Image (cartoon, rainbow, N blue to C red):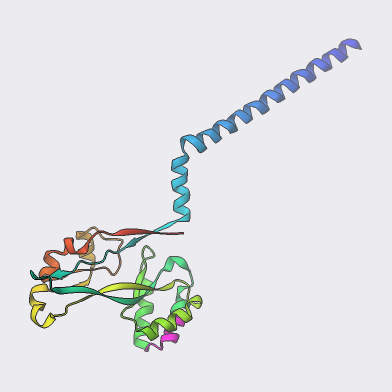
Amino acid sequence: MLNDEKLKNKLFSRRALMLTGGKFSLLSLLLARLYYMQLIRSYEYSVLSDKNRINLVMVPPVRGNILDRYGKILARNDSSFRLMLDKKETRHYLQSLHKLCQIMELSDKKKAFILAKAKKSSQKAPILLLENLSWQDVANIEENIIYMPGIYIEMVNLRNYPYKEYTAHILGYTGIINDNEKAQNNLNNIADFHIGKSGLEKKYDENLRGKFGIRKME
């Protein structure tokens, strides 16, 4: 009877030791994994976390002015407002567009053009809907902007030539970049960006264009 009791105690002690050893091994693995993730690979996981939380948006540069040798401005930038759509902000962007067309009282032709452009556009970058908005248009849109997710107003600079009657043939003009020009200039992810199309605007486009910035949107 006494031997049986000793055997039971011995078995219990062995099992307790094995159980304690197993728990210690699991705890060691967890601590090692925690050390590996928090210290060794902390930067990598931090970057991945920021990618899920922060969206990087390219900010177009302000195009440089063109001056004559006396310092007189021949080409400059004037502020203007344009309407943009970011399809990544909402899946129901078509509802926003219908509301927009109703507010601005757009013609059926203009409405069809905007809807078709939005449907075939990519989600990689915001797309241009309307430009050269008047103050009244801006006021009407801003008043109802909460009902149109994905749509926002952006202030941009438009090219202006004070002496275009005399300098148009020399200065040339700027226009929205096309697919071929995007590939040539490595600007595939940029939508509705203006570059030089002819004249001095084209010849010195790289210098006049400037460098893109980045805006972080959380």
Q: Which residues are magenta?
A: 98-107
Q: Nearer the viewer, residue 150 or 2?
A: 150
Residue 20 falls left or right of residue 46 = right
- Residue 115 is inside the magenta segment: no
Count numbered badges in the picture: 0
Residue at far front of view: 70
Q: In the rendered image of this protein, does residue 125 appear above or below residue 155?
A: above
* Quarter of the rendering containing residue 78: bottom left
Q: Is residue 143 visible?
A: yes
Q: Nearer the viewer, residue 210 or 126?
A: 210
Residue at 23% x, 63% y is 182
How far from the left and from the top, in percent, is residue 113?
34, 81
How far from the left and from the top, in percent, is residue 163?
13, 80
Q: In the rendered image of this protein, does residue 21 appear above or below residue 182?
A: above
How far from the left and from the top, in percent, is residue 127?
35, 70
Q: Main secondary structure of the magenta part?
A: helix
Please identify the quadrant where the N terminus is shown: top right
Q: In the rendered image of this protein, does residue 144 appear above or below residue 58?
A: below
Residue 172 falls left or right of residue 14 = left
Residue at 63% x, 30% y is 27
Q: Is residue 173 visible?
A: no
Residue at 78% x, 18% y is 11
Q: Nearer the viewer, residue 148 or 94?
A: 148
How far from the left and from the top, in percent, is residue 46?
47, 45
Residue at far top of view: 3
